[in-house]
Amino acid sequence: APAPKPVVHACGCDCSWLATVKDNCRKDACADRCRVANGIAHPISCGYDAYGRALTWAPSRNHRPNDVWENGQRKCDCQWMAGNDGLGDSCKTGCAPSDCAHKCRLANPSGTCFA
């Protein structure tokens, strides 16, 4: 059997759970970022809850991102987020608060990697 692929960590998130835990389709910033950073860019199914409802997850697509504006001037062009059919953000780079990618995530809190 091939060796398991190493887990990639996402901005501000430890994603090691992906290698050891069955995904339960949890929806929060780190769970979403970890899936996207590790190439899970399609809807997934995780079984059923106690009431028989299907547990699913799908990445949030950002087709019309907001740019970052400061004092009436565009500081960060965030249109790259719309690439790859709205999944242009990998959640792996630009993690520092001074980075435009970080600022773009704050300007687009419901985007692929959330804020």
Image (cartoon, rainbow, N blue to C red):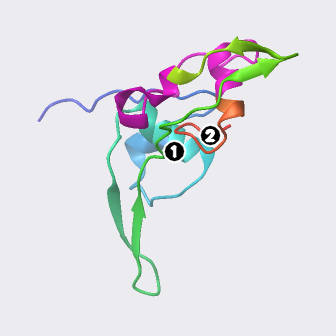
Residue 16 is left or right of residue 40, and the answer is right
- x%, y% of residue 58? 41, 53
- x%, y% of residue 51? 46, 87
- x%, y% of residue 26? 52, 58
Residue type indicated by callout 1: Asp
Label 1 crowd (10 A; few <14 / some 14-19 / many >=20): many
Query: 75 or 11: nearer the eye?
Result: 75
* Residue at image coords 53%, 36%: 64
Residue 5 is left or right of residue 90, and the answer is left
As displayed, is residue 97 above or below residue 19?
Answer: above
* Residue at image coords 56%, 36%: 113
Q: Which residue is mark 2?
A: 114
* First to last magenta residue range: 80-104
Query: 47 or 68: nearer the eye?
Result: 68
Residue type indicated by callout 2: Phe
Q: Which residue is mark 1?
A: 32
Label 2 crowd (10 A; few <14 / some 14-19 / many >=20): some
Residue 107 showing in the rendered view: yes
